[in-house]
Image (spheres, rainbow, N blue to C red):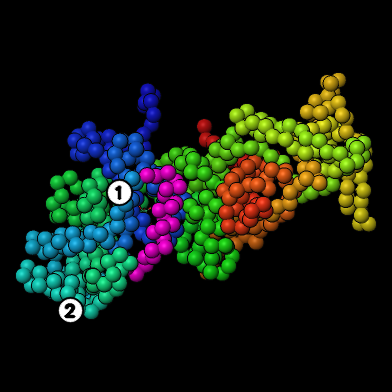
């Protein structure tokens, strides 16, 4: 399609067709998390997809907690999920719903199905139901209770609701087709007895609807048009359609499946993260090495970078894994022009300018971001003693080395040209201090006689430097060995996933507020940690280094 202005994804194509054919006259999407854990990057994809479609078509986006399962849900997660979605920028306005608010209406639909002869109460045990269901190659067997009278079913279902049966003693099943090639259609259970308290409805109910019955009804009650879910529900679609059809909604919702987002070398499974937290390997669900939305926020990712990532990944029908480096690419791109570029030294070595007056300091002016003038300028102290990176000096460098070694002249970023005159060592021969002289004529970084230098190195003036804790990260799992151990399914942890380094930084960085982020020149992007930073003593998490292994596909 050479002339197509923008290429739409397959979901947009479905929506376009539905609107053109008058199947719907508007678009309503939703995000329906189960409040049983924190959201992760995969959920972010689903949220931004659903919200983005609603916005694109001038429609509405609903937020709905799918809290039909009383055992697993926790109120704690409801709050964290709301916070994460707000942070991502998806706005549900006044449409915050709870599936449990529909229990009464769901019950009414179940009664209607019984009255239509489309549902029956079964006495078989869970195990018998499994046996009767048959296999992929053999049809199922009908339950002896399948042909109960409508009156008897109504009475028994009422008794289930009234608490006359123990857990598992009776279930309500949809009456569909025990010989269907789709196992989900072989008279699925739609209500079970469970004497459990629910976080929202308390002890009002002792019967609870099953997911495959509840979910389509939730969508239909809310007037959702396009119910977008992940591929594992493809086989459930006939049942979804059966439910909304038998419940006789005039404009039933349509289920559309897309592939889940998987990232390489990260852990998303709730079970694994829980264990990492319990074993004290990570510092909670928002440890910056995780990819929960809370962890990404803590590490310093922005909503814009996640949106960019989701857009780059696109929507597809086949499962695949996306390289973590692509997410890193997006945050670099987003912060590149937005954040000041300051100087910080992570592996300090002392540099003494022997011809600079002792006890003197001066203030130099530096642009905050060479590529974005709008970020303004700042003053930085300069003096006789500085910190430089250890790797920026070598006694005996290889040929192409452009930084400092005896006899060479380099530029101190935003300051002067200096010429290395010598160095001190300890008894073991380790360099402890580098000596140089500066040329006062080269203030601002260029020489009046036009001579050039090959290298520019960053620095921090020693007497004004702030000392901070920085945390450098690698993937939490070992890339070489793979995420999971083949033998026992345990995680192959990377012992170097966290390195803590004391760094010297420009004085202004000592005022950094939680979540504020910066580029530390040549060292990467860093963000002040909200948990561990104290007033005047920030802790910086490295969001990402500046080196990229990812190339944007052409
Ligand atoms: P997990 O077990 O990984 O936390 P889940 O599917 O159990 O995921 P739910 O709360 O049931 O979590 O999911 C809410 C929505 O998010 C669903 O519509 C689901 O399809 C979608 N979703 C979950 N994981 C992903 C993923 N990796 N990529 C895209 N969408 C996802
Ligand atoms: Mg789930």
Horizontal and vertical percent position of residue 251: 17, 45
Residue at 65%, 61% in the rendered image: 495
Task: Respond yes or no on whether mark 1 lies under 8 Å from ligand 1.
Answer: no
Task: Using the image, tell me which numbered label, if any, was put on residue 278.
Answer: none
Left or right? Give the position of 8 relative to 176.
right
Asked if the magenta segment contains residue 73, the reply would be yes
Instruction: Judge from the rendering whether residue 554 lies leftward or rightward of residue 153; answer left or right.
Output: right
Which circle's residue, 2 or 1, is located before the other in the chain?
Answer: 1
Residue 101 higher or lower than 162, as above or below: above
- Marks 2/1: CA distance? 36 Å
The foreground one among 466 and 341 is: 466
- Prevalent SS, magenta region: helix
Instruction: Tell me which segment is drawn in magenta.
Output: 70-91
Q: Is residue 74 above or below residue 292?
A: below
**Who's the residue at 73% across and 32% down the image?**
365
Q: Which residue is mark 1?
A: 95
From the viewer's side, name the closer residue of 546 and 257.
Answer: 546
Coordinates of residue 309 in the picture (x, y in percent): 49, 42
Q: Secondary structure at mark 2?
A: loop
Q: Is residue 13 visible?
A: no
Q: Residue at x 39, y 47 (%)?
A: 47
Task: Check mark 2 vs ligand 2: CB closer than 8 Å? yes or no.
Answer: no
Q: Quadrant of residue 358?
A: top right
Circle 2 sits on which residue?
164
Number of numbered discs overlaid on the protein picture: 2
């Amino acid at each position: 399609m050479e002339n197509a202005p923008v290429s739409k994804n397959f979901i947009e194509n479905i929506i376009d067709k539905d609107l053109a054919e008058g199947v719907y006259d508007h678009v309503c999407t939703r995000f329906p998390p189960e409040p049983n854990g924190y959201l992760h990057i995969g959920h972010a994809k689903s949220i931004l997809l659903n919200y983005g479609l609603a916005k694109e078509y001038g429609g509405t986006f609903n937020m709905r907690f799918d809290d039909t399962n009383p055992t697993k849900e926790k109120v704690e997660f409801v709050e964290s999920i709301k916070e994460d979605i707000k942070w991502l920028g998806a706005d549900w306005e006044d449409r915050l719903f709870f599936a449990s608010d529909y229990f009464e209406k769901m019950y009414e639909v179940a009664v209607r199905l019984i009255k239509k002869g489309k549902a029956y109460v079964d006495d078989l045990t869970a195990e018998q139901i499994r046996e009767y269901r048959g296999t992929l190659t053999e049809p199922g067997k009908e339950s002896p209770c399948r042909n109960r009278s409508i009156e008897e079913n109504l009475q028994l279902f009422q008794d289930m609701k009234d608490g006359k049966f123990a857990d598992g003693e009776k279930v309500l099943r949809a009456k569909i087709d025990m010989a269907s090639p789709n196992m989900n259609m072989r008279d699925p259970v739609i209500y079970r007895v469970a004497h459990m308290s629910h976080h929202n409805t308390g002890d009002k109910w002792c019967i609870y609807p099953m997911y495959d019955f509840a979910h389509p009804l939730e969508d239909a009650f809310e007037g959702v048009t396009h119910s977008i879910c992940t591929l594992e529900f493809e086989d459930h679609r006939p049942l979804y359609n059966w439910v909304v059809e038998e419940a006789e909604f005039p404009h039933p919702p349509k289920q559309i499946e897309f592939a889940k987002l998987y990232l390489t070398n990260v852990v998303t499974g709730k079970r694994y993260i829980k264990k990492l937290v319990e074993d004290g390997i990570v510092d909670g669900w928002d440890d910056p090495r995780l990819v929960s939305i809370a962890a990404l926020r803590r590490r310093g990712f922005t909503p814009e970078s996640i949106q960019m990532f989701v857009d780059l990944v696109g929507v597809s029908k086949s499962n695949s894994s996306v390289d973590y480096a692509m997410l890193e690419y997006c945050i670099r791109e987003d912060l590149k022009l937005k954040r000041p570029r300051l100087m910080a030294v992570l592996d300090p070595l002392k540099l003494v300018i022997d011809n600079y007056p002792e006890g003197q300091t001066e203030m130099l002016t530096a642009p905050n971001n060479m590529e974005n003038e709008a970020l303004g300028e700042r003053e930085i102290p300069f003096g006789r003693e500085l910190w430089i990176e250890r790797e920026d000096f070598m006694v005996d460098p290889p040929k192409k080395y452009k930084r400092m070694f005896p006899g060479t002249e380099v530029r101190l970023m935003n300051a002067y040209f200096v010429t290395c005159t010598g160095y001190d060592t300890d008894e073991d021969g380790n360099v402890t201090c580098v000596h140089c002289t500066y040329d006062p004529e080269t203030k601002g970084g260029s020489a009046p006689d036009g001579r050039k230098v090959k290298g520019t190195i960053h620095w921090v003036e020693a007497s004004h430097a702030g000392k901070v804790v920085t945390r450098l990260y690698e993937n939490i799992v070992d890339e070489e060995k793979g995420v999971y151990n083949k033998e026992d399914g345990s995680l192959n942890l990377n012992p170097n996933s966290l390195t803590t380094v004391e760094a010297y930084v420009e004085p202004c960085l000592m005022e950094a507020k939680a979540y504020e982020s910066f580029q530390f020149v040549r060292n990467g992007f860093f963000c002040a940690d909200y948990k561990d930073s104290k007033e005047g003593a920030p802790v910086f998490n490295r969001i990402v280094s500046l080196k990229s292994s990812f190339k944007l596909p052409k």
